[in-house]
Amino acid sequence: MSFFPQLRKDPIIDRWVLIAPERGVRPMELADRGEFKRNRPCPFCEGHETRTPHEVFAVRRPGTLPDTPGWQIRVVSNMFPAARRDAPPSQGRDLLEACPGYGVHEVVVESPRHDLSLTDLPCEHVRSILQVYQQRVAALARDSRLQYVQVFKNQGAAAGASVEHVHSQILGVPIVPRDIAAELAGAAAYFRSRNRCVFCELIERELADGERIVLANERAVAVTAFAGRFPYEMWILPRHHGSDFQSAGVADLDEMADVLRTLLDRLQRRVLGINYNLVLKTAPLQSEPRPDYHWHWRILPRTTGIAGFELSTGWFINPVPPELAAQRLRE
Amino acid sequence: MSFFPQLRKDPIIDRWVLIAPERGVRPMELADRGEFKRNRPCPFCEGHETRTPHEVFAVRRPGTLPDTPGWQIRVVSNMFPAARRDAPPSQGRDLLEACPGYGVHEVVVESPRHDLSLTDLPCEHVRSILQVYQQRVAALARDSRLQYVQVFKNQGAAAGASVEHVHSQILGVPIVPRDIAAELAGAAAYFRSRNRCVFCELIERELADGERIVLANERAVAVTAFAGRFPYEMWILPRHHGSDFQSAGVADLDEMADVLRTLLDRLQRRVLGINYNLVLKTAPLQSEPRPDYHWHWRILPRTTGIAGFELSTGWFINPVPPELAAQRLRE
């Protein structure tokens, strides 16, 4: 049997799965979960640029050439893509629906140095990383077949990271995924009934309440999520309303970078463990600016397991009240 | 601050979270993930019955008393409940909606012996476990405030288990959870358009296709899930249509027990690792028999991590094509 990446819809609910055999995980390797692959020399380290696919973007010293040393941040195609541009045509069935796994899967190598975490990097560097994300999201938006882009960072093996070198990922897909669609629908419903962006309202309510505020400055507000799925889960919202990340202004972006860096640093220092997912929430790529959606980031610390209850019901059990988490993160 | 278990709704989407501070996980302990707590003597072992809450049900030798040795399967209340019956009244707010964490959380200790897995138990014993589940689900259904019951088993630390002694859990909740509601809606939509249960149709289609069939006998059909979120994910469906598990006949239940035991045994032998979640899917507790829903079990092997992409989008990446998985599980 030969397989291409494929998108398959669950026969009962509107949830798609990327079947990505190119990721090359075979049963013997599956048991390695939790251990980083020690394939040295690391292909993400400076000087090993030929061990990755060609770079699609980089922040590098003037005069240096692509795929050579001299970069600070480097974006390459994922070597084991969950989706790819040359997928074959759909096999279209009804109950068992599949379509080609069309998409773009990129890796953002955040530093030439192997053994750093995001919080070890200077503020300016973290700001550059957010600018790189923004440029890549804007670039992907020009491909009209891509409907959504997920920017995400998996820090630590418990958060699903398989490579140790500091990096994040960008995955563009041809369908707006289930949970994003649910958020858009929820936000749209709120807007219809109150004529206001639910996130703008949330910022106001949280500032008035105060008990879940972790950090608030002129441009951004960070709260522990009222119904967070994970202990210490944080939502970081720009005060300025905007539905898509790629249209955010430089000042908002810089401030967001500083806030993210501060929060991740506090999380590492005050809650043992450095396993977390950092995810961007933004409007669909081919969408006009929307009054009802509001881009933001979420930090999902991965200190508790995801078990059968969560995977069957979609509900989570969070043992740390968000108000208590906020208090600890504020101190 | 003092906290009771609470159910909180996400401000944007219709997803509730159980805030369960009684589970007593403090930041320092959160980092222990992946390691079993070695609190010996184990409270689930025979002879330590006084170390758990009182038993609510047991399969035991005639003449032996509750909370004493002599049992084969023992059901007790969870010592760290995610929900409890005496929760205080709701605080009802709009954008930030919470209600008391009313519910029932029980543990099914599947054997008096500590170091066994489900597949080490004789067929008869596994059949008894399913009968115990059935009796407990029927008992919970008599509480009209409970709308759904999730029976689940977490095997192995990577599957979220925190206790080593062979056990499973039953959690009854006062709202039909999001993913269950989505399944009911999907199944109802299919029924409206085709006048047929989507699961009955799925069984027929899968038997005709054949490539995802792992095992099929007179009463049950096991397939690798067409759009499985996890490598080797299996759905095990009774051929006889029935919407709720508690109404299943003895023959169907016994056959299901034998099939589950066989599949878990194959999974352990052919795919390295014994981390999995086993989850029951059944109609809401207070529902009449439905022509459009079909109870079944799912086995979710936990060999791949759940990372930022999955947690933000609700989509999963599965590196093992289900057809290949079925082939390996059939051999």
Image (cartoon, coloured by chain):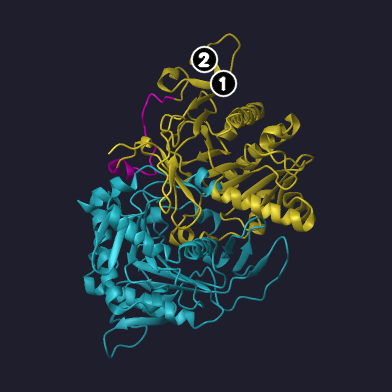
Chain colours: A yellow, B cyan
Local secondary structure at mark 2: loop
| Pick the front one: A59 or B55 | A59
Mark 1 sits on what residue?
A: A58
Q: What's the magenta region?
A: A27-43
User: Which of marks 2 and 1 precedes in the sequence?
Assistant: 1
Q: Residue at x 65, y 48 (%)?
A: A235
Give the residue pinned by disc 2: A66
Could you tell me the amino acid type at mark 1?
Ala
Q: In this view, does A272 lie to the left or right of A240?
A: left
Vertical order, B155 against B80 (above or below): above
Q: Distance between the residues labelled 1 and 2?
A: 8 Å
- Amino acid carrying label 2: it is Pro
Q: Does the magenta stretch include residue A36?
A: yes
Q: To which quarter of the image does residue B83 belong?
A: bottom right
Residue A209: x and y in percent read 77, 58
Q: In this orientation, which residue lies closer to the viewer: A242 or A307?
A: A242
Q: Is residue B50 visible?
A: no
Residue B215 can be seen, yes or no:
yes
What chain does badge 1 belong to?
A
Percent x, y for residue A327?
A: 68, 54
How many other residues sit within 10 Å of disc 1, few (<14), some (14-19) or many (≥20)? some
